[in-house]
Image: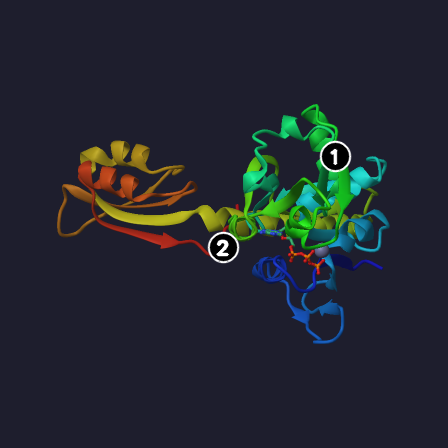
Amino acid sequence: MNRIRIAIQKSGRLSERSLALLQSCGLRFARSKDKLYWYGQDFPVDLLLVRDDDIPRLLMDGVCDLGIVGQNIAREVTLENDNTESLEELRSLEFGRCRLSIAVPEKSGVSSVADLDGSRIASSYPALTQALLAERGVNAEIVKLSGSVEIAPGLGTAEAISDLVSTGTTLRANHLVELEVLFESTAALYGQQTGLSKEKQELLELLLARLDGVLQAAESKYVMLHAPRESVEEITRLLPGAENPSLMNLESDPTRVALHAVCREALFWEHLEALKGAGASAILVLSVEKMLG
Ligand code: ATP
Ligand code: ZN
């Protein structure tokens, strides 16, 4: 069958953004509330909605061709398999950002991970935690927990935890302090290592090109401004990531031109102020929805 199957998280932190990202690539699905399989309408691309932990395995077993999952989970599952089966990270995405950190009780007196040699560390990411601690020369006993890791020190089942943190609120609420970041993670699009059929490969390339367009557009801005004719070069230099701006004559003022450009890098107030300082006026910044080529 030459349909591509993409696994995404059914319900959780990554679900909404994963679906929105695929939709912004032009994919439409016949949704069914209770079913876990959504059929692709305009493209032969279907969705499988599953628990995030199952996504790496579905790719390794060839059940799905693509999957969106946190790098933390992809790394954990490949390590559990001793790296014998790997996943290919096709694109890292800009959501699901978090860090795997070691935390200890506020009053523990532990000030570095080196002090945790020989202690018990509770984690839902045992393989990843063990590997990253070993890199730091720390040998700890990992207590595997599937959830509520933050209560382990209070219960006396571990001296420290290794858990995902984004804001740190959960740690503070449990009187834990973050000692060290072991791993930074975002969601990513993964593919399987085995070769796809020619048709699927072509479809994948089309999807990746659209995805790149969406990711690039998210950062890009379309800038319009008026500039003194003699400052066009300087103003172009002040626009981050802009190439070949379009110039238009202004009927009302022959000394000034209208300049339009796409900035492919983040544009801050400081940039606009610098532009104004170089003589630009009527500066407008618009967001870009899609981009190709
Ligand atoms: P499932 O029911 O699918 O197994 P889950 O409870 O394991 O869901 P979520 O809590 O929805 O998973 O987290 C999914 C992913 O979101 C994590 O694996 C991680 O990559 C990312 N993430 C971002 N911020 C956080 C955070 N503060 N805590 C946990 N995960 C986070
Ligand atoms: Zn999960």
110 up-or-down from 267: above or below = above
Where residue 116 sits, quadrant-wise, is top right
Q: Is residue 35 or residue 155 the one in the foreground?
A: 155
Q: Residue at x 56, y 48 (%)?
A: 171
User: Which residue is label 1 attached to?
Assistant: 130
Where residue 229 sits, quadrant-wise, is top left
Q: Residue furthest top?
A: 137
- Badge 1 or badge 2: first in the primary sequence: 1
Q: Position of residue 189 (x, y in %)?
A: 67, 48
Where's the N terminus, which quadrant? bottom right
Q: Residue at x 59, y 29 (%)?
A: 112
- 169 relative to 156 in the view: left or right: left
Q: Mark 2 is on which residue type?
A: Lys
Q: Mark 1 is on which residue type?
A: Gln
21 up-or-down from 127: above or below = below
User: Which residue is label 2 attached to?
Assistant: 290
User: Ligand 1 is found in which quarter of the picture?
Assistant: bottom right
Does the rendering let one see residue 32? yes
Q: Position of residue 232 (x, y in %)?
A: 25, 36
Q: Residue at x 59, y 37 (%)?
A: 108
Disc 1 versus disc 2: distance between alpha carbons?
A: 42 Å
Q: Position of residue 173 (x, y in %)?
A: 53, 53
- 5 relative to 211 in the view: left or right: right
